[in-house]
Structures are given as C-alpha cells and as structure tokens.
Amino acid sequence: MHEISLCRGLLARVLEIARNHDAAAVATIRLQLDPLGRMDPQHIIEDFAHVAHGTPAQDALLEIETVALRVHCPACGMESDAAPDDPSCRRCGNGDTRILNGAGLVLLNVELAP
Ligand SMILES: [Zn+2]
C-alpha cells in the first residue's frame, strides 16, 4: 500500500508547521481524502500513528473528510457529484466527463497544542 509514504510526506509537512510555530505538540490534523485514491481512512490513521511515533505529532487526532467525486461535463457544462464507478453526467448522461478531483490526500488544517 502507498498510504505509508503519503503519511510520511504528511508528517513532514505537519512537523514543519509545528516547528515554524514553536509548538511542542500537534493537537488535530484535518485531512481531505479524494475518492479516486480509494484509500481507507482507518489505514491512514494507523499508518500515521506508526510514522508519527516519537514525534510531536504522535498524539494528534486525525480528522478525515472524504469528498465526493466531482465531474465536469463538456457537453452541457454541468458540474456535479458522481459515483467513483460511474462518472457520467447527472444531467445529460454524457459518459465522457472530466474528473475534477485528484487522487490524494489534502492537508486542510493543523491545530497545534499550546
Ligand atoms: Zn452533461
């Protein structure tokens, strides 16, 4: 699985934010998970706990928000949510839509402990 490398990258960014603010610990990390990554939030929490062990982020609470797949339809101009296995347009049924989401993990915000 590639969650572990994503978690390492995430940890590096979180620790940099903590360092820049002279924070002793990280309280909460909010993430957005794109649907195409097909990653299990529970795996991310476990992998993050593993890589963050012994760092100021080890007790951080991970809040993971999964967003719907967003598609843009070039035929009718509609932008809508879609199921990952059926990215066709909700309005006109065009199957040739453009997917707007990425397939990654987005760091939304970090709360530092005082
Ligand atoms: Zn359409």
Image: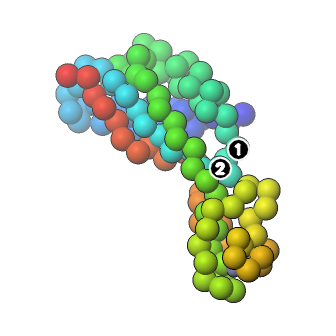
Query: Which quadrant does the C terminus fall into?
Result: top left
Query: Which quadrant does the N terminus fall into?
Result: top right
Name the spot of residue 24 as percent of width and height, x first: 25, 19
Q: Residue at x 34, y 36 (%)?
A: 110
Q: In this view, does 31 lie above or below 67?
A: above
Asked whether the beta carbons under mark 1 and mark 2 sit within 8 Å of each other, the answer is yes
Query: Residue type at mark 1?
Result: Arg
Q: Residue at x 61, y 68 (%)?
A: 80
Name the spot of residue 89 as percent of width and height, x first: 71, 73
Quadrant of residue 13 within the rendered picture: top left
Q: Residue furthest top?
A: 54
Left or right of residue 15, residue 64 in this image: right
Q: Name the residue under label 1.
A: 38
Disc 1 is placed on an element classified as loop
Can residue 16 be seen here? The reply is no
The quadrant of the picture showing ligand 1 is: bottom right
Can residue 30 be seen here? The reply is yes
Q: Which residue is drawn at 52% across and 32% down?
A: 8
Q: Mark 2 points at which residue?
A: 35
Disc 2 is placed on an element classified as helix
Left or right of residue 39, residue 20 in this image: left
Q: Residue at x 47, y 28 (%)?
A: 62
Query: Residue type at mark 2?
Result: Pro
Left or right of residue 56, residue 8 in this image: right
Quadrant of residue 4 within the rendered picture: top right
> What colour scheme governs how the chains and residues are painted in the rendered image of this protein?
rainbow
